[in-house]
Image (cartoon, helix red, strand yellow):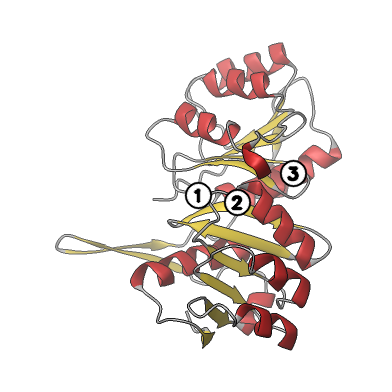
Amino acid sequence: MNAEQLHGKELSFNNINDANGALACLREFSEPTVVAVKHANPCGVGSAGTLAEAWRKAHDADPVSIFGGVIAANRPIDGETAGGIAKIFVEIVIAPDFTEEAFAVLAQKQNIRLLKLPSLGAQGPAASLDIRKVDGGILVQDADAELYDEKLLRVVTQKSPTESETKDMAFAMKVVKHVRSNAIVIAKDGMTLGVGPGQTNRIGAARIALAGEGPGGLPHDKKGAVMASDAFFPFEDCVVAAADAGIAAIIQPGGSVKDEDSIKKCDELGIAMVFSGVRHFKH
């Protein structure tokens, strides 16, 4: 990570790892976007016409988990955005640049790390290989660089998603790709409403995501939102949980021997389902 540190304490191992995870997710987006990461998982992501609005969405997505997290933005931090960030404790803010006003506001916090990375303005994957250390050696594989091929998306239910739901599903898939598996993301209008990361069963991840809370500790209204899954549904339980919460559409890779059970349950409950054909399974 070739960022220039402009202010704050020395970066720790975990700081750098979390910042790298935030950058990987952020590079999926071309529009003004803010990604908040906590313990290597996105906890709030927002996209909007302005960076300040994207920040508000990312913060309000999960105002509890964002505390002590890493904030990454793909546009220079301006004064309005900095004013919002300064109201809470965060470890790192990384962006292509900071305006003079923004830097003056954030630098009042002695320990916050401010990192400048001009290449954040460019969309696309940062690495071609995924390298992990294991006992006695290393594992190397191609990086998970692709989201999915839009031409291969397949509506498998009687009901088709609306244009806005399709847009929300693309947003949600960009996020769930970077959440530890088993992973579920709930999203609506360019904002995550719940993230279920790293569970040993998919319904557990779904329940965590569907329980996502916003400002004041109140549950987000999930009616009309979409659900994205990083891998297929082995059972229909996630569909039932989604329907109970008011989810309108689901996107998942498909490929389970029990796909038909989930499809039938979606038809029964009036939910649109799309198969992407691409699993992510981040570990």
Sequence-first disc among 3 and 2: 3
State the image coordinates of residue 209 (x, y, percent, origin top left). Answer: 56, 36
Side of 65 relative to 39 (left or right): right
* Mark 1 / mark 3, whichever is N-terminal: 3
Amino acid type for the residue under numbered disc 1? Val
Task: Please name whichever residue, 74 or 141, is drawn nearer the observer in this view of the structure.
Answer: 74
Tag 2: amino acid: Val
Image location (x, y in percent) of residue 47: 74, 57
Query: At x 44% / y 50%, what residue is drawn?
Result: 282
Question: Is residue 129 found left or right of 26 in the rendered image?
Answer: left
Marks 1,2: beta carbons within 8 A: yes
Q: Are marks 3 and 2 in contact (CB under 8 Å)?
A: no
Q: Disc 1 to disc 2, how far (Cα)? A: 7 Å
Residue 97 shows in the view:
no
Q: CA distance from mark 3 to mark 2?
A: 11 Å
Q: Badge 3 is on which residue?
A: 168
Identify the mark at residue 179; answer none if there is no mark: 1
The quarter holding residue 267 reads: top right
Q: Report crowding for label 3: few under 14, some 14 to 19, many 20 or more residues within 10 A (C-alpha).
A: many
Give SS at disc 3: helix
Asked whether residue 207 appears in the rendered view, the answer is yes
Q: Which mark is residue 175?
A: 2
Q: Which residue is rendered at x = 72% and y = 32% of the image?
A: 221
**Whole-percent x, y for residue 130 in the image:** 40, 64
Marks 1/3 in contact by CB < 8 Å: the verdict is: no
